[in-house]
Amino acid sequence: MKNKFRNNNSAIKAGDLILTEQPFTFVLSSKEKGSRCDNCLEKGKVLKCSGCQFVHYCGRTCQKDAWPDHKWECVNLKRVSPKVIPDAARMLAKIINKLSRGDGHSYRAFYSGTSFRMWKDLMSHYSDLKADMKRMDHFTSLCGTLHEFLKDLSLPNTVELMGLYGRMIINSFTILDIDMNSIGTGVYLAASILDHSCSPNAVATFDGKTINIRATKDMTYLDWSQIRISYIDLMKTAYERQTELLDNYYFLCQCDRCLDDAQNKMMHAAECLNTDCDNPVSIPWKENCQLVKRLEISEVKSYDSTIQTHSNDDSEVKIGGLVNENVTEDVVRCNECGTKYTEKHVEQFIKTMEFTELHLQNMKEASVAYVDVCKYCLERQEGVLHPLNVLHAQTLDHAFDALIQVQLWQNACMYAEKLLPCFRFYYGDRHPLLGLLHLKYGKILLYKMNLNEALEQFKLAEKILKITHGDKHPLYREQLVPLLRQAMIESNQ
Ligand SMILES: C[S@@+](CC[C@H](N)C(=O)[O-])C[C@H]1O[C@@H](n2cnc3c(N)ncnc32)[C@H](O)[C@@H]1O
């Protein structure tokens, strides 16, 4: 299927689809094995491939469609069985195979009537990879697996293989299902032209394995060098975002948002002790907690953009970030109303931050959110952390999910109300996760028969999802629209 794209010269409105593309290569996540089709990625009843007994298809059409790509993999998966090949090794093997067959090297992915990208156009960050111990360990272990997995296929030499590996990791998209959960990985040659911003003007969503890029802001015309999506979860401090992007993509993000002091100040703020004042108060609470505006230039890992250069010529680059204007003569006070913090208050804030951080880390490692732990953290945060403090926002997010799991609807509603401003602050007004939060909250309200409130949430979800997903997307058409109708009928509107 050919890519679809927008004409460059016409004005772009928020919600316009600017690119639709099929993957160059993709893999279904192994955690989804047996519950989704390995070809269309749809959830449902699937049957094992009789050859390898490893991949699954929802029917004959998908099996036939996948066969040219699966043929060589089928034999190899069968040979190494019962050993399970890691997803990244399968993906790299698919890339090697695609490039060694027919059109792999010459395949052109168009993003306008005349412009296209080929595999060779993707950035590999070769020299950064070589200097990155963690990535080199991963690469070495993948090479071992590949030699065992692709016994009969002659592998490229190590330098070439590392180029392929680099292009794969720098340009891969995480394929998300309707609820924004990760279900696979794909390389999309045209969509991989898109650079990152923490305040993006476009969004990537998926319908099965098809990627759709939509504008989330109006633009006078389509200039691909100005389109930005977000590569990472945005509910983080600027320091965390910059570090993650440097570690994984080898560039220092200097977007407006990373350099916005007012926003950054909010993210680790305490609540003002004066209940009439909603000003965020920053209290230093651990080394490096201060937001990094710009890192020392020597720490910035180089990047070599093939389509554009990102200027990085600021000579005033320093480490350490913001001066804390709330701390004068060792006394912390609110710089809006002047309320003074005692040592006891400062200590309480630091302990709450440390306690929350520890529990969030534990839940992350266990990949589970515990209702009691979240509730206890939130109780301690009450009146201490600012309502938009990032650790408070992350706790609320975990708490909301955990409460839905155990069907404690009343509490879930209470947390959803507090979580919505946090989502708006961290993700922006036109983000799929904000749309989904309105939808989930609306469903709970509908279940509780709070019909008018439910309708209000569905309408808010509609406004966002129409832009981020479009009205043809299954999330919009099959989930939101029926709920919206039901809420309208039941509330007589
Ligand atoms: C998927 S590629 C994006 C397209 C890439 N610029 C190109 O020309 O092929 C990801 C790489 O682009 C660069 N990049 C993306 N966003 C950037 C940004 N905001 N500032 C600087 N470099 C960025 C980084 O080198 C990153 O590893």
Image: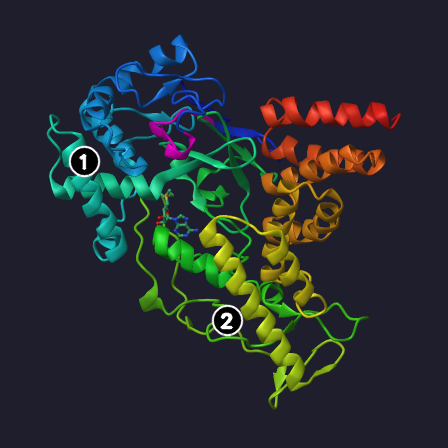
Return the x and y of residue 33 as percentages of the image width and height.
39, 28
| Front residue of 453 and 448 | 448
Quadrant of the rendering where the N terminus is positioned:
top left
For image coordinates 50% across by 71% down, the residue present is 289
Return the x and y of residue 41 as percentages of the image width and height.
44, 24
Left-right relation of 471 to 458? left
| Front residue of 462 and 286 | 286
Q: Is residue 67 above or below residue 384?
A: above
For image coordinates 24% across by 33% down, the residue present is 83
Q: Is residue 411 above or below residue 381?
A: above
**Which contiguous range is marked in magenta?**
20-32
| Front residue of 434 and 307 | 434
Residues at marks 1 and 2 touching, judged by CB atoms closer than 8 Å: no
Return the x and y of residue 465 as percentages of the image width and height.
64, 33
Left-right relation of 417 to 148? right
**Residue at the extreme bottom of the image, as rendered:** 329
**Residue at the extreme right of the image, as rendered:** 492
**Distance in Å between CA atoms under marks 1 and 2:** 41 Å
Residue beneath disc 1: 146
Disc number at residue 381? none
Q: For residue 210, say whether it is visible.
A: yes
Disc number at residue 289? 2
Is 252 inside the magenta-drawn segment?
A: no
Badge 1 crowding class, 10 Å Cα cut-off, few under 14, some 14 to 19, many 20 or more, is: some
Residue type pointed to by label 2: Cys
Left-right relation of 94 to 411? left
Is 29 inside the magenta-drawn segment?
A: yes
